[in-house]
Amino acid sequence: MTKSRASGTHRRLRSSLAPLAAALLVLPANADVALAAPGSRRSPTADRPPDCASRIAAPPPAGRVWPAPLDRVVQLRADDATLREALARIAREARVRFSYSPELIPLDRPACVEAGDAALGDALVVLLAGTGIAPVVAGTDQVVLAPTRAAAAADAPPEYARTTSRLERVVVTGTATGAPERETPFALTVIDAGSGALARSGTQSLGQLLDGAVPGMWMWTQSPTSALARYGSVRGASSFGVSAPKVYVDGIEMANPLLLTTLDPSRVQRVEVIRGPQGAALYGADAIGGVVNVVTRQEGVGASTPAAELRASAGTSASAFASAPVLAQDYGAVLRSGSAARSASLGVTVSTLGAFVPGADARQLGASASARRVGARSVVTATAQFHGSNAEPSVSPLLAGLQTSADSGARQSVRQYTVGTTVTLLGSDRWTHALVAGLDGYRLAGVSTDGIPVSSPTDSALRTARGGADRATLRLSSTARFGAGEARSGALTFAAEHSTAREQSNGEAGALLMPRDPRYGSGDTTGGPTPPDSTAPYDRDAHAGGTTWWSNTGVLTQGQLALANALFLNGGARVEYISVPEYRSQVALLPMLGASWLRERGPLALKLRAAYGRGIRPARTVARGATWTGGSAERVLTSLAPEEQSGIETGADLLWGDHAGFHVTRFDQRASGLVQPVALIDSGGGSGTSGGGPGPGGDGDDYRVAYQLQNVGAIDNRGWELQATSSAGPLSLAATLSLVSSRVHRVASGYSGDLRPGDRMLEVPARTLGLSATWTSGRWSASSSVARASDWVNYDLLALARAIATARAAGTSPDYYPVGPRLRDFWRTYDGVTHVNARASLLLGRGMWLTLTGDNLLNRQLGEPDNVTVLPGRTVTAGVRAGF
């Protein structure tokens, strides 16, 4: 037997089968922890936990014949440890590796066993009594702790549903196939249902949930009539208008990450977030701003999950622009079957909001289905999601009289779907393989382009564009782990991923122009230095609509090395081949390097970490090509240089078990080639492609404000992220603070927009803050959250619309139109916005809950992120939730 170098509370856990975390995370237990010597003797009651005093398990039965390696003899004594520690001890003594799901085994309960020598199989039977878990031989030194047939009929008792230590939590995001959080070298935020954040949030939007909960990330609250997310910051600016992290749903990439807000939070099990480009080496192109991985619920029927669940709520939303409070409704139903080992579920949600602005209302329908099967050597999951919404938008009441009929809101509709499967196989006692295959797509019509600064008829063609896209994802990864439980251990991951996107558009030209001269198609010269009132070097995009195909193919190699289970080194690189229509295909190398050092003393743990990463995003993406520009600017986009971001982050995590934690991160990143729509004057000669009606003076000229997409230059994103959590009995507290500086480092030669070196990037808050508190008792629970963003620069859109209307009515020269550098005159600083939400629930009995929810309790409708966007006011709803 190998002796340990630490006490019983100084646990050093090692993961060997983390890839199974992708669906039902299989966590190995071959840990380096304290182990009683075979000949040692202690008093039967010495240092015994109170829970053990009344329930010492019987010694294992003798005479049963076990196959190797379950026939190895171990000493079984575990009255001074948790089940997690007891499994780790006998794993080291028997020199085997255990693989199991932390969702199925009560790892934190006391392991109350006292006996002498026993076969490993007998020892496991005693330790796992009452859990419905049995040992299954998977290799010469590999044992899987899998559910028995009896366990498939019911979940473990409620006392077994506790979560594992935070550093041992297996996360999918951040490694190619999943690993314990202790090994990740960069900041990673996890919001899971086990913490109660999802279950008690009461939100109908993931954006509302993430604000204040994820440091460094801020999503502007959107009107219910807008389905597209609008990011204020993901560690600063990584794009204009379409800034977004790369989003996965159960391992399947979303075709348009701006549709993250369409996902139903009530059907989400966990959200994992990486900020910055460190995840690009693992997830490829488009991940320059970060990665969001959404894991949906896969539970079966159990003590806390009824076979059927219904919810209904209704209330009112206040509005300063409506004659009376408007009706808000939300309904949902979920059907479940099976257990944690084999499960299936189906859910449906419906919500409506009345006209909080005259003529504007919204209706949403969502459906989801999932299935999972956990075997001794495999996990198979399947998921399907659908979201549909219709909205009747109207002109902002603040812009009444400043817009023409061409600007009246067209009917908006969104359809989004995700379907796919994940298969994880334990190929041997060393290798684990994972396969993800899926399809994600959407269809949009009449969706507004909020990233365009000038609120005028210029964007009417974009608002009425119709289009969509579908993206197929296929990813295969294999991970080999070596030296588990030894002083030196490691893992190698090899992965290949291919995605193909198919985009459809109606060919609306919109108000986008492109250079005629081919010399404007490379790097910093994009856009040209031509004065904005000359149309000589510009040409309207002649794309006539139809179907466009492009693809990404990536090959990844990643290595991890652990020394004494205290120093973790991570390195990897992804070679990405990007094939874009009408643009030279390119090969990009996306590296990632990181290291973390962990020191533990009893329940205290200190982790220091540092990481570097580089990411790339082609100018031609689904989000920009099929959403921002209505699918109409193919040649405009493909003539631009790609966006890039690279940089480092360093940080420290101080944890006191699961009771408290403090995290601090410093990031320093540089983004280059960001694409901005630059406002220009287009003398279209009456073609009408850019909208706007008759030109000034009525002399036959047809001046219009149009947009040309240009690479800006280089942006420095720097700042600090702080997060603190505390849990004591029924009370849980959390706080986040982000300090972000996002400034222009240099501008590209020929850039004709309104930014200059040293300027702050528009719409990026300098500070974001989040506070939340949750109290849970036997019959009731209450939670409240405060999220605030402050100090950002954006356009005064109201003054801008007035200036355009005045210039058009007066027939002045186009030189006086607020375009190009003259837009700087309309910059203004916004002080800030605060969101206050609250939720309470009371158990009435027999699975019936009464719920009360309040959103936007400060009743603020204006000022986010500009001065013309109108949001619903204070919304208060009451409802019931019943389980059967």
Image: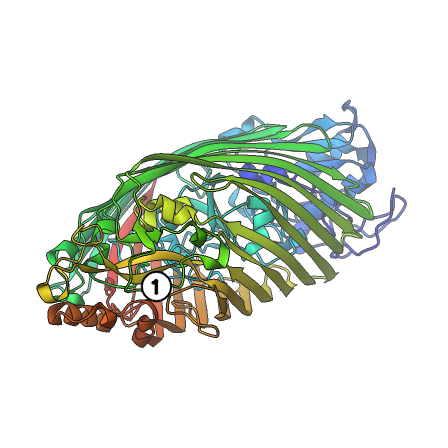
Q: Looking at the picture, does residue 331 appear above or below residue 215?
A: above
Q: Tell me the residue at 18%/65% (across/down).
A: 319
Q: Looking at the picture, does residue 64 appear above or below residue 261?
A: above
- Horizontally, is 627 left or right of 777 in the view? left
- Give coordinates of residue 1: x percent, y percent: 87, 42
| Secondary-structure class at tag 1 | strand
Question: Most extreme residue toward the right, as rendered?
Answer: 39
Q: Nearer the viewer, residue 672 or 296?
A: 672
- Horizontally, is 349 left or right of 18 in the view? left
Q: Looking at the picture, does residue 295 appear above or below residue 438?
A: below
Q: Nearer the viewer, residue 24 or 547?
A: 547
Looking at the image, can residue 228 be seen?
A: no
- Horizontally, is 514 left or right of 282 in the view? left
Counting labels gives: 1
Q: Tell me the residue at 69%/49% (across/down).
A: 571
Looking at the image, can residue 318 be seen?
A: yes
Q: Amino acid at mark 1?
A: Ala
In which quadrant of the rendered view does residue 416 lie? top left
- Give coordinates of residue 423: x percent, y percent: 55, 30
Q: Nearer the viewer, residue 312 or 579?
A: 579
Report the residue marked by disc 1: 838
- Give coordinates of residue 659: x percent, y percent: 59, 62
Q: Looking at the picture, does residue 177 appear above or below residue 615?
A: above
Within 10 Å of disc 1 (Cα), the crowding (few <14, some 14-19, many 20+) is: many
- Give coordinates of residue 619: x percent, y percent: 44, 50
Q: Quadrant of the C terminus?
A: top left
